[in-house]
Image (cartoon, rainbow, N blue to C red):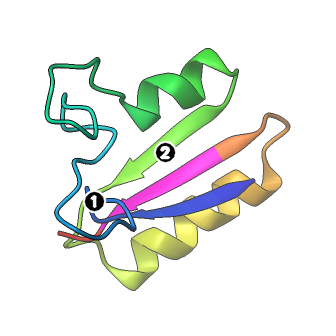
Amino acid sequence: FMLMLNNSGALSTGLQPTPASGRDALGRSAPSLNITEIAKACGLSVIQLPSNVSQGEIKKALSKGLLGLKSHLLIIDTQ
């Protein structure tokens, strides 16, 4: 079980593009990476929650992820 808080950015400095931006470090066009699709390709079951989610909904999603037989990735958008 994995938990990710997604702010749609990367821990970077100097205004570097993020992996999802579609640009490389030199500003050239590059493939845009989608963490949800990568997780699914790795066999994870993805649970995605919006930024305005309630604590109760988070608890339900955590229970589902922890009690499931399959590996889960819980993504909570923070924007």
Which one is in front, 17 or 53? 17
Instruction: Say which residue appears at 15% left-offset and 24% top-offset.
Output: 28
SS under mark 2: strand
* Residue occupying image coordinates x 19% and y 73%: 52
Stretch in magenta? 73-77
Q: Position of residue 73 (x, y in %)?
A: 60, 47
Specify the principal SS of the magenta part. Answer: strand
- 45 horizontally vs 24: left or right: right
| Residue lying at the far bottom of the rendered structure | 55
Q: Which of the labelled discs sits on residue 9, or is there none?
A: 1
Tell me residue 44's x, y (percent).
Answer: 67, 30
In which quadrant is the C terminus drawn? bottom left
- Please tell me in which quadrant of the rendered image residue 68 appears: top right
> Which residue is depicted at the point 27% across and 25% down?
32
Residue type, numbered disc 2: Ile
Q: In this rendering, is residue 68 above or below 23?
A: below
Q: Does the magenta portion include 29?
A: no
Q: Nearer the viewer, residue 56 or 34?
A: 34
The residues tagged by marks 1 and 2 sit, at their Cα atoms, a distance apart of 19 Å
Q: Specify which label sits upstream in the sequence, 1 or 2.
A: 1
